[in-house]
Image (tube, grey):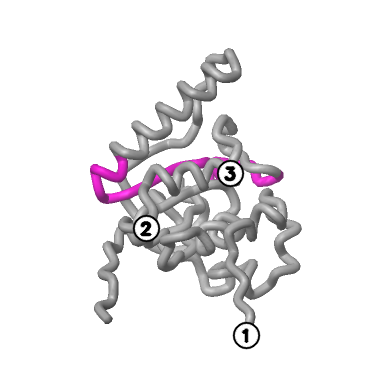
Amino acid sequence: MKKKEQSKETIYMAGGCLWGVQEFLKHLPGVLETQAGRANGFTKSTKTSYDGYAECVKTSFDSKVVSIEDLIHYFLEIIDPYSINQQGNDIGEKYRTGIYSNNQNHLLNAKNCIKKIEQTLNHKNKTIKKIAIEVLHLTNFVPSDAEHQDRLSLHPNDYNYCHISLDLLHKYKKTTTNI
């Protein structure tokens, strides 16, 4: 039997505190791996003071299983798309929402998807609101320290620091049983 070829691509998603964002994203269909980190700061270290970065999750996915548009729709389940520099109790520029990539097609698809969602929501709710998710070229990525990688998998009781409810956090987590 021939093994199905994967088409691995990577996008960086910022949605507030990275612990919950990573825990949510890693269980999505088509997501191959995640890494907590910092996007678009100016330094290459986590040991410096705040340098403009956004807490984010490097998300590698199989584009034959899940698209950029699919990932954005999932992402909208865990963020307030209108909030600027805040998700839940996490406040500050580093908690802004964003989508970053080195792939121009990713950025174009993300911008178009967000624009369509914004138009649909405004029409449905009879409002004129702007979605505050920045979509930018990735200029820098610094992986978070080991203590922040897979934090909520390793320390599940820390979920109460998270802006994402526990039910939503594991909505797509598959459970396996040995029979």
Q: Quadrant of the N terminus?
A: bottom left
Whether residue 119 sits left or right of residue 157 in the image: it is left
Whether residue 168 sits left or right of residue 2 in the image: it is right
First in sequence: mark 2 or mark 3? 2
Q: Secondary structure at mark 1?
A: loop
Based on the picture, tell me whether residue 97 belongs to the magenta stretch: yes
Callout in the foreground (3, 1): 1
Instruction: Give the Cα distance between marks 2 and 1.
Output: 26 Å
100, above or below 119, in the image: below
Residue 106 location, x and y as percent? 30, 45
Q: Amino acid at mark 2?
A: Val
In the image, 52 versus 97, the foreground residue is 97
Part of the protein shown in magenta: 89-107
First in sequence: mark 3 or mark 1? 3
Pick out the residue farthest to the bottom. 179
Residue 2 location, x and y as percent? 25, 78
Instruction: Give the Cα distance between marks 3 and 1.
Output: 31 Å
Callout in the foreground (2, 3): 2
Q: Quadrant of the C terminus?
A: bottom right
Q: Residues within 10 Å of mark 2 (few under 14, many from 20)?
A: few
Which mark is on residue 65? 2
Which mark is on residue 178? 1
Q: What residue sits 49% from the left and 62% below the top?
A: 36
